Amino acid sequence: MSQAELLGGDALATDIRASVRGRVAALAESGVEPTLGTVLMSDDPGDERFMNLKHAACAEAGIATRDVRLAPDAPAERVYRAVTDLSADDAVDAVFVQVPLPDHVDTSAVRSRVAPEKDVDCFAFENVGRLVAGAPRFEPATPAAVRELLAAHDVPVAGRDVVVVGRSSVIGTPLANLLLRDAPDGNATVTVCHSRTRDLAAHTRRADVLVTAAGVPALVDGAMLSDGVVVVDVSANRREAEDTGEVEVVGDVDFDSAASTAAAITPVPGGVGPVTLACLLRNVVLAAERRHEGAGEGGRVSDGCG
């Protein structure tokens, strides 16, 4: 196996989180405590783990949290009320809803209840529209993390063929929009592949940069890549290891075979994940700074995660 460059996210995440702590401290001097409200309606161990990580990261950064957890079979009205209450609570600066939601919950009804100014992961309809129009209020944490990771490792996307595998409304589709926009970190030629794509390998072999976010272990292997491609594996799939039976976390890409072809590749875990958490924290602080304009860092308000 050739030595593909590892696009690790830990160092970048550490830098972002240090910046977040400084901004939290500045807000504290003005009497403001940034607060994130979260809603989880799932008993999936992976969802619970991700939510726990978010709360731990907030605690480390000095961000307060409100943690609403509902049983997956609870009435839909309970999640609608929880989101409405957090959005209306003046002590809450940011709202995050874990998706996917159970089948009996109308996701559109939840989206419509998230206050756009608190919607730190671009879930509300208004913020989705702003992102598509090229003027996002917040960049969704995971797509922003992909963009930040590529920039930190000096991987250009302008004019290059970027293939995104996965069209979810929280990762694949917003990432495609961010990469397409006329901006220094955009101007890519983007192809979005999904479960109905015919001959996935024909598309992945054309990629200069491949981003996978399908949630399917070993969906892509080295035979589906061209020499010199940059691979960003967003997924963190939990499965039992064949040899030990223990739960392991793997991406969508077969790492060993892909690393023999790729110029650079993200590890799973340790790639996009740490940066995603850091970008979410940054968006929470940004929401607090905007809501309490004039507090923290001289009232400085910046856009997005970058």
Image: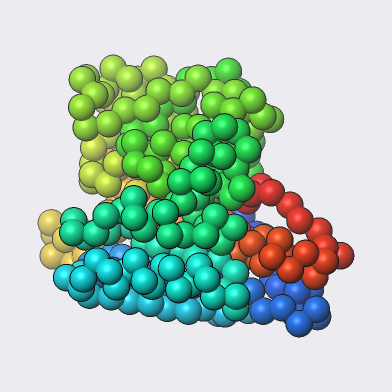
Tell how many labels: 0
Q: Quadrant of residue 159?
A: top right
Q: Is residue 223 left or right of residue 213?
A: left
Image x and y of residue 53, in percent: 43, 71
Q: Residue at x 20, y 27 (%)?
A: 196
Q: Is residue 273 left or right of residue 236?
A: right
Seen from this angle, which residue lies furthest right? 298
Image x and y of residue 67, in percent: 42, 78
Image x and y of residue 75, in percent: 21, 71
> Relative to 253, is 11 above or below?
below
Image x and y of residue 48, in percent: 31, 71
Q: Residue at x 40, y 54 (%)?
A: 111
Q: Quadrant of residue 152?
A: top right
> Relative to 197, is 71 above or below?
below
Q: Residue at x 49, y 42 (%)?
A: 128
> Relative to 129, is 291 above or below?
below
- Residue 276 shows in the view: no
